[in-house]
Image (cartoon, helix red, strand yellow):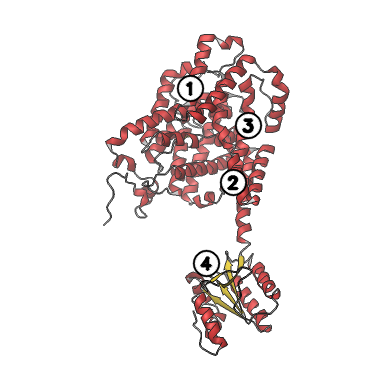
Amino acid sequence: MTVRRSDQPSDDSASSHGDVRERWLPLPGWVRGYRRSWLRADVLAGLVAGAVVVPQAMGYATVAGLPAQVGLYTCIVPMLMYSLLGGARRLSMSTTSTIVALAGLALSSAGIRDDPDRAMATVATLTLMVGVSMLVFAVIRIGWVVDAVSNVVITGLKLGVGLTIIVEQIPALLGIDPGPEGFFRVLGHVVTGLSHADPATAAIGVGSLVVLLGTARWLPRVPGPLLVLVAGIVTIGLLRADEHGVELIPPVARGLPVPGLPDLDHAGALLPFALAIALMAYTETIAVGRGTRGVSDPPLSNNRELAVNGLAAVAGSFFSTAPPAGGFSQTMVNAGAGARTQLSSAVTAFLAIGVALVLAPLLSLLPQATLASIVIGAVIGLIDIRELRRIARIDRGELAVALITAAIALLTDLLVGVLTGILLTFYLLLRRLDRPSLIELRPDPGTNRLEPARAADEPIPGLLVLRLEGVLYTMNIRRVQRELIERIDALDTPPRVVLLDARGVSDVSVTVMDSFAETDRRLSVRGIELWVAELPTQALARVRRGTAWATWQDAGRTHASLDAAVTAFRRDCSGGPGQAQ
């Protein structure tokens, strides 16, 4: 009998039993096990997170060339959907800088980014396609593929996204006329246009950015985005800065979005972007969910999170939202404010509803420079120099992969950067798989146990012990075969027995077994025997089906452990029996 702690929210998804619906879309566990003592913390956390996510999401919408209210709507329907069905207790779902950057690229490819009305209709189509793609991924259980995308590639992609968005927001921040698209073209336009910056706009934009960075650094509990949003509106209301050249955001429509059917006219052109956004949205959502998971929280299911994120996108598409995903900064604010369950996200969504119904006219007084500063303040954390230094200390090859991904995103576009990152991920995987190691083992002088050899350690006369570390398969077995022969050739005195510690070999193929048989024949011509020890159960069951294994076993060349093999070798030298596996 299993006893559940009374203070821990229940979650049927933690069980491996039950029907598909219960595993993927269970009833909200936080509702069934909710405690009244959590209410105050959840409400406060939801309000604090809302003070960050609402202005941030509005700013993100402008990155994609969408009206600011699209970001506001994305804080409502997708967030409510995830609060009911999602598995991460503290995750706050709206949209992210990576997602809106890709969405903006999709709208540009469809040729309608500069038309706000058509952009709103088309982004609904894109959001629907993203949601359907994620649902399909969940059905075919493709979550493991997304998990294969390395953190190094994500770091590189975020670097490219962060630099691109920051440079694209600088004209609005300083009051420079909008320029061409593309990182380097925009950067050149900014450099040549600095002398034409509007002083009043630059003062508001730079001042807002300083406040945002200062509060994040020294007053992390203060909602900086809300603070500069209010300050920007007050500046316009009291000083009439808009009469001195300060540009305001387009009017924000008052009220809630009217449900409608997405227009599928551009579905063909949007499909590649929808697939890329689906992959990135899931990657960000699952990473944020796991990063803020409490010790007593239930484990997250890849396919369930895919399904829930997909449903949130499908539902949002009928209400003119951008593609949703779990946002890191807003989730960290939510968690830091003490959120206990998904009720905090529901509170944030209702706060967004209140803003849409009541405060929309005031939001229309917001300077473009203020909104640009909110976007820059939100994405500047994507440029993580400390993480790049950490990667460089561990593996310079992986640093190169991160920088290549970032460079491709800057030189071409984010979609190509995403695809390049995925290809580089699998390149890294194949690179590691293709390089299994042969490590020589020798007796430790103090313990007499076999350990990785040091220069001063003496080998057992006539015995070369090699530990095989890595996965063996068709593409790398020849490399292992060559290295083993080279190790033997490098010795002054050839061994009588080569003993392979095969504990790291989880499975073997026919090609691998044939290659070992070939190696055995090549060694036997030179008077050297090949022994194997500690072969795992799965691999052992497979090699026993081959014709050579029985011969090896009868000859005492297979052993259950290294110690047994060494003992058998010494007995064999003195004429005693061995111990076969």
Q: State the SS at label 3.
A: helix
Q: Nearer the viewer, residue 182 or 317?
A: 182
- The residue at 45%/48% (across/down) is 303
- Quadrant hosting residue 470: bottom right
Is residue 443 in sight in this rendering? yes
Residue at the disc numbered 4: 506
Q: Which residue is mark 3?
A: 108
Label 4 to label 2: alpha-carbon separation: 31 Å
Q: What amino acid is found at the position of numbered circle 3 in the picture?
A: Ser
Q: Residues within 10 Å of mark 2 (few under 14, many from 20)?
A: few
Q: Nearer the viewer, mark 4 or mark 2?
A: 2
Query: Which amino acid type is marked by label 4?
Result: Ser
- Alpha carbon of mark 1 to alpha carbon of mark 2: how far? 34 Å
Identify residue for label 1: 227
- In space, the residues marked 1 and 3 are separated at their CA atoms by 32 Å
**Which label's residue is closer to the chain start, 1 or 3?**
3
User: Does the residue at mark 4 contact the one at mark 2 (Cβ under 8 Å)?
Assistant: no
